[in-house]
Amino acid sequence: MRHKKDNKRLGRPTAHREAMLTNLLQSLIKHGRITTTLVRAKELQRLADRIVTIAKRRTAAAYAQLTKYIKSEREILIPKLVEEIAPKFAERNGGYTRVVKLGFRRGDAAPTAIIEYLSEVIVGKPVAEETSAEEKPAKEKKPAAKKAPAKKEAAPKKEPAKKKSAKKKEE
């Protein structure tokens, strides 16, 4: 039993699984959106959100922690993460990525999904144009609907039927 185990094993040894997830993470940072299997996308989502939270700190220690997850193209990917991606989510606490189910892959019918960073439109709530109370049209009052008449009191319950043997004795 795998009680209290934190991650999916994805059918791979630990080193292979970690390498695969860091490669997926690097592709996500580089391209902003990738297509993979649903289980991998969900595992990657946990890692990607953790990385953005680290990048939002912008300290020397944060850069050192990011190098643990980003193995290749560090000179390109870490600055992109810290200077472009993390500032978009400055006001947001978690939930920086979205996983969208696509369907099933041809060949092995594995469920596939797209994982992507949220866009700016979704991050900030759209601001509705505010109008003053004078400009708003007055709402017309509808007449109140009449309530249904109260139900009549329930009729008294009938007594249970007497046994046949009792009827015969009375006759």
Image (cartoon, rainbow, N blue to C red):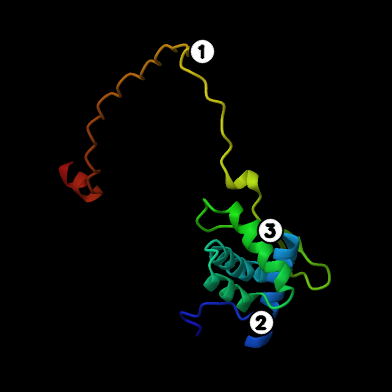
Image quadrant where residue 71 sits: bottom right
Q: CA distance from mark 2 to mark 1?
A: 61 Å
Q: Which mark is residue 17?
A: 2
**Vertically, is 115 above or below 122?**
below
Does the CB distance between marks 1 and 3 fall below 8 Å? Answer: no
What is the residue that sits farthest to the left in this orientation?
170
Residue that carries the numbered disc 1 in the rendered image: 137
| SS at mark 3 in the image | strand
Q: Amino acid at mark 3?
A: Glu
Residue depicted at x 56% and y 40% = 125
Query: Going 59% across and 57% down the picture, which residue do you hit?
Result: 96
- Separation of residues labelled 1 and 3 (CA atoms): 42 Å
Q: Position of residue 48 (x, y in %)?
A: 61, 66
| Snapshot quadrant of residue 38 | bottom right
Q: Residues within 10 Å of mark 1 (few under 14, many from 20)?
A: few
Instruction: Provide residue 95's location: percent of width, then percent of height.
Output: 55, 57
Please state which of residues 151 and 105 is positioned toward the viewer in this rendering.
105
